[in-house]
Amino acid sequence: MRWGLLPGWVKDPKGFTLLINARSETVLEKPAFKKAIRRRRGLIPADGYYEWKAEGGRKQPFFIHHADGAPLGFAALFETWIGPNGEELDTVAIVTAAAGEDLAPLHDRVPVTISPRDFERWLDCRGDEIDAILPLMTAPRVGEFAWHPVSTRVNRVANDDEQLLLPISAEEMAAEVEAAKPKKVVRKVAGAAVDDGQGSLF
């Protein structure tokens, strides 16, 4: 599926802003999500996710993951958009909630993660009742997640390797800060040629 939900009632997708997130507080009322939350719920598996925090005039990336290293299941809503010529496009959005006190310094919103014991309850869309899944759309418990700084190499989409998940030391972080500073260019002013006599025969 493409990340960025496109509701089925959209006539022209080119003029519609893609919805990458669905706020848990308003998901039941928003026209774009109120049908999907009842009939089209899914899970997005992940090892973790990145957030950027302003530090010392730069944005430092952090990798956020389950404290015990277990994989995550992001709460998701999906739609299949059908075009005028019968073409189909499957799109998805991640449900978010207000961050708890531990994660709030990194970002005020967090993805809603569904515990494995609640996978079946979240995915069960056979009925139209949603009371059973409402308590699941909350932020992680304090202490449930952990995070560490990672290399700014993650800022480039061309970089895609496991090193981007590994923590970096304070020394490595300082080296990246230094490398990111603008380089000073020393310009030499051309002066009159000096004759030191080495080009002379006498």
Image (tube, helix red, strand yellow):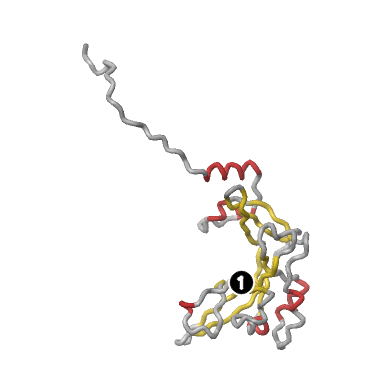
Residue indicated by mark 1: 21
Q: Nearer the viewer, residue 106 or 63?
A: 106
* Residue 78: percent from left, percent from top: 61, 78
Q: Is residue 14 above or below residue 148?
A: below
Which secondary structure lies at badge 1?
strand
Horizontal side, residue 28 vs residue 15: left or right: right
Where residue 24 sits: x, y (%)? 68, 74
Horizontal arrangement in the rendering, residue 135 relative to residue 3 (left or right): right
Q: Where the N terminus falls, by quadrant?
A: bottom right
Q: Amino acid at mark 1?
A: Asn
Rendered location of residue 110, percent (x, y): 68, 65
Q: Quadrant of residue 184?
A: top left
**Residue in front for this viewpoint, 178 or 162:** 178
Residue 81 shows in this picture:
yes
Q: Residue at x 66, y 78 (%)?
A: 27
Give the vertical position of 23 relative to 155 (above or below).
below
Residue lying at 67% horizontally and 58% vertically, measured from the top left: 106
Q: Quadrant of residue 113?
A: bottom right
The residue lying at 34 percent from left, 31 percent from top is 189
